[in-house]
Image (cartoon, rainbow, N blue to C red):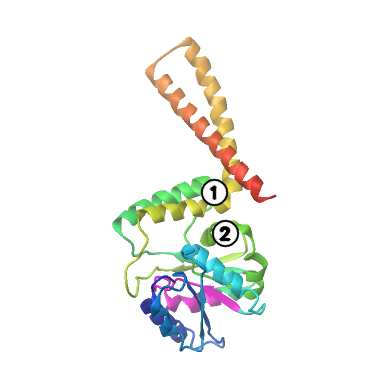
Amino acid sequence: MLHDTESYLRVRTETIEACAGRDEDVRFLVVDDSAGTDPELSRLRGFDDVDVVVAPFNLGHQGAIVHGLRLLADRVDDADVVVTMDSDGEDQPVDVPRLLDALDEPGVALALARRTQRSESLLFRLLYPVFRTIFRTLTGTTVRSGNFAVQRGASLRATIGHPAFDLCYSSSLLALRRPTAMVPCARGERFAGRSRMNAQSLMAHGIRMLLPFAERIAVRAMVAAAVSGTVLVGLFVALLFTVNAALVLATAAVALLFVLSSVAFVALFTRFDRSQR
């Protein structure tokens, strides 16, 4: 949480109300991503069901979630249910019981909110389908989820130490390929304040979402380099016998694809190789 105390107070109240008919006791772990500089957080000290963890420095929303979960992992029992959600209200508390019900289905280790509707800016709505297409092309995985997730304590302890979570929490939930239930949930509007995510931070987040899939992307880049290299050789041979503008443009385009895919393969494979040492 980063300067979102007003929103969080409503998130807490509505989450308790949404889960009122269930047997579980509800407790909250709040990660203060302001590194202790937000005086408003003192308003949470009086709640017996709220624990506040102060991040050592600003970790970003993905890093703050992982920081809190790694601290929480040793405190929960195997059967305890852990819910991760944003503090601003965009992850709607009314959807929590539906995610909990999905987790009770046989064989399900993880329940994720699948976004069916988003209340975002026009620029975001225009660019998000482009990002999803790029993500699908590079990873073979469709991204329709975020931080809103539910899992049991045993699952959390088994996975949260994975180094992929140091890169991005939300996409690591997909990259680890656990048996997952996707629950349709519309994304809500902030309860208070304004989002601090600008175009640059959104682009950076998009890049981080790709990093847990580095091995998969490297393999696809290798295939693209091999195919484009073969086609490039054929085009060069064709250019020896005939020259026209279309053939020259095609050769240049394939050559560019070959260079880009080769560079991507080398960079991503090197990164993956280092992570395995």
Mark 2 secondary-structure assignment: helix
Magenta stretch holds residue 265:
no
Query: Left or right: 173 with respect to 250?
Result: right
Mark 1 vs mark 2: which is more N-terminal?
1
Q: Residue at x 53, y 25 (%)?
A: 231
Mark 1 secondary-structure assignment: helix
Query: Which residue is denoted by mark 1 in the rendering?
Result: 139
Q: Residue at x 48, y 10 (%)?
A: 241
Residue 36 point in image, percent of width and height: 45, 74
Query: Left or right: 210 with respect to 163?
Result: left
Magenta residues, start to end: 81-101
- Identity, as a three-letter code, of the amino acid under mark 1: Thr
In front: mark 1 or mark 2? 2
Q: Marks 1 and 2, Cα distance to the nearest angstrom?
A: 19 Å
Whether residue 115 appears in this view of the structure is yes
Residue 166: numbered disc: 2
Q: Quadrant of residue 243?
A: top left
Residue 275 point in image, percent of width and height: 64, 50
Query: Left or right: 77 with respect to 231?
Result: right
The foreground one among 208 and 67 is 67
Q: Residue at x 60, y 75 (%)?
A: 72
- Is residue 18 shown above or below 267? below
- Count of labels in the image: 2
Residue 136 point in image, percent of width and height: 50, 49
Q: Quadrant of residue 109?
A: bottom right
Outermost residue to the right? 277
Q: Residue at x 41, y 64 (%)?
A: 116
